[in-house]
Amino acid sequence: MAKIEKIELRMVDLVPKVKRTDAIQSFVSQETPIVTITDSDGATGTGYSYTIGTGGSSVMRLLADHLAPRLIGRDADQIEAIWHDLEFATHATTIGAITAIALAAIDTALWDLRARKQNLPLWKLAGGAKDRCPLYTTEGGWLHIETQALVDDALEAKAKGFTGSKVKIGKPHGSEDFSRLSAVRKAVADGYEIMTDCNQGFSVDEAIRRAERLLDPGEVE
């Protein structure tokens, strides 16, 4: 039974290659907390999570001061038990992004460690129900992108084998969102999934009002 012996913490600040905007924000950077766990057999597993520009230093302090020390000496195979222990140990701050991001990086690292030790890809370790899955793209659907560019990106993605595109919504007027989505739907035709994302930019009433119209060309998140 291998025990956890070492925790390494790193932060990588990634600058987006393309401008990213949605209904409430622009992505300045992607702070990426990285956790590497080493057990007594010398095996390692790495996990990471990310922010969109703020809070990364708080995540790192929570990992370094509170969560990582609690991992030392634990059986690395007790992934669920470890998660519940860490969640309880931070119960006062569990509801919130900082703790969730920190726990996610640890949990992913533990699953990576188990998969590596068993020499299995994670999808097989998790049960192997399917050997492939449909993919959709979000990279060409940012809110500032002009309609024709949205259309071009969706057509290119479809040609590459993607099954859908996600398009950001949240323009000042709902008719602008509808026009953009309708142009993409017309270009890719039926059978290609168009998802939308308002990124918490609407009230409940506004979300319902826009969804009633936007559900025709695509689904609403």
Image: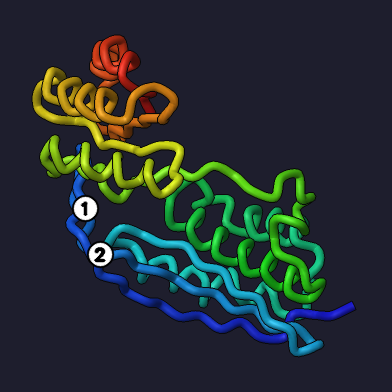
Q: Where is mark 2, residue-wise?
A: 16
Please tell me whether mark 1 sits on a helix, a strand or a loop.
Answer: loop
Which quadrant holds residue 40? Answer: bottom right
Nearer to us in this view, 190 or 210: 190
Residue type at the position of mark 1: Arg
Q: Nearer the viewer, residue 74 or 197?
A: 197
| Quadrant containing the C terminus in the rendered view | top left
Determine whether 188 is above or below 78 in the image: above
Q: Judging from the image, what secondary structure is the residue with disc 2 in?
A: loop
Q: Is residue 178 left or right of residue 79?
A: left
Task: Name the mark on residue 20.
Answer: 1
Residue drawn at x 47%, y 62% is 49
Name which residue lies at 28% across and 61% down: 54
What x and y, as percent, mark residue 44? Answer: 68, 81
Q: Nearer the viewer, residue 50 or 69?
A: 50
Q: Is residue 190 above or below residue 46?
A: above
Residue 181 is situated, as x and y percent measured from the top left of the image, at 24, 26
Determine whether 196 is above or below 173 in the image.
below
Callouts 2 and 1 close, C-beta under 8 Å: yes
Q: Residue at x 29, y 40 (%)?
A: 155
- The x, y position of residue 43, in whole percent, is 74, 84
